Image (cartoon, rainbow, N blue to C red):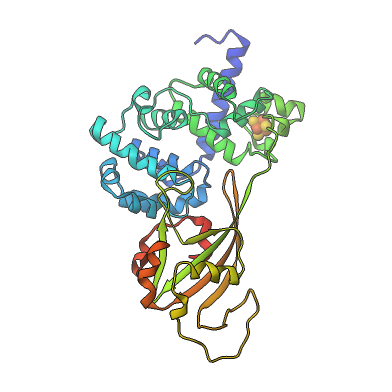
Amino acid sequence: MALSDPAQKELAAISSSLLSWFYENRRDLPWRFARTPYSTWISEAMLQQTRVATVLDYYPRFLKRFPDPSSLAKATEDEVLKFWEGLGYYSRARNLKRGAEYICEHFGGTLPSDPDLLITIPGIGPYMQGAIASLAYDVAIPAVDGNCIRIYCRLHSLPLVPSEQSTYKEIYKRVSSDLPEDAPGDFNEALMDLGSLICTPRSPKCDACPLHANCSAYLLGKQEDFPAKKEKKETPTEDHTILKIYVGNKIIVKKRPARGLLAGLYELVDIPGIKTSSEVRAFLSEHFSLESLPKSDSTKSGSEDSYEHSKDLLDIRPIGKSRHVFSHLKWNMLGYEIHLPAFLEKEAASLGEAVSPRKYKSLAFASAIRAYR
Ligand code: SF4
């Protein structure tokens, strides 16, 4: 390529400065050794919306148990969710399984190198398509994510809103023209590292940035003005009372529906709203024959929200408040632990399934209720 045009010279300068910086500073991450298209897919799925430090723990365990698309396709959804438990955004795990089934059915168990085929796999969107094709197969295609959008908006002082489709298209076009044919994967990965280590959302470390001489936002002294910010809407909040109910030594659990929030994960008994122990007692009386419980001979009278020792030996113990923030919703929770005698197990069916402690341990629960597990 003849570099007579100043704009082309600038592009070459960006790409060579970025790559030189990357070769000296790239992070030694486990998915970068012995890279395969499959391991790239798994690591990129885990890294979406999740910190690298968290993924470091999950990635080797997941890959050991599911070393290829075939093992993932054959596993039950419950088992895949169990290996994902705590990572959040569980649709990623379900999509990986669906994607693995599709790969086995249509591509003989190997991820294809053609981006047009990759995008047909359930759960693989444009970012993942670019990441797998460029990192694992050296195909010259951008992998545009939030980091990439932030860096490019700053480099060219573009007041674009990251979540808009027009922003994605604009940045995709710009990255395509910067992408070096001989190192597209390294270039995309360099942008990922630069966004995580240097060009961070707040307080970017511009003095250490290999691109600062070409960065318009830096030269203007307005790094944090780009990209543009979308007006924040108030996140809705829901209140929940979580009941960990023992019937004998078994615990009542319920599988959430296959679609919607926390789909397919297990939960404890969940009543909408924040309830007092008296209200919890009233709720339990709709499901269990509480009159059959042994009577207490104690004259002790408990307060409304502590131990409840009134006419019978029903034990309703508060186990604390907690809060969980989803991407679009907040949950305020209050938990209670309840012990019922084993002879009431049959009556538990209206609330869920009473499972042994061993089975309980093997199930995948949403991290939202971690405090009560
Ligand atoms: S100079 Fe600063 S704002 Fe510009 S790309 Fe580098 S870190 Fe980001």
Please state which of residues 342 and 128 is positioned toward the viewer in this rendering: 342
Asked if residue 357 shows in the view, the reply is no
Q: Position of residue 366 (x, y in %)?
A: 47, 55
- Residue at the spot x=68%, y=35% of the render? 206
* Residue 290 appearing in the image: yes
Tell me the quadrant of ligand 1.
top right
Tell me residue 311's x, y (percent).
Answer: 54, 83
State the residue at coordinates (50%, 52%).
54
Residue at (38% x, 51% y) in the render: 81
Residue 170 vs 57, above or below: the answer is: above
Q: Position of residue 77 (x, y in %)?
A: 33, 49
Q: Where is 193 relative to 300, above or below?
A: above
Drawn side of residue 226 relative to residue 83, left or right: right
Q: On the rendered structure, is 76 left or right of 206?
A: left
Q: How many marks?
A: 0
Between residue 155 and residue 28, name the one nearer to us. Answer: 155
Give the answer, above or below, for where 152 lies relative to 10: below
Q: Which corner quadrant of the image does residue 82 belong to?
A: bottom left
Residue at left offset 41%, top offset 69% = 251
Query: Based on the displayed image, in which of its 4 quarters is residue 266 positioned?
Result: bottom left
Looking at the picture, how far across and down is residue 316, in whole percent?
54, 75
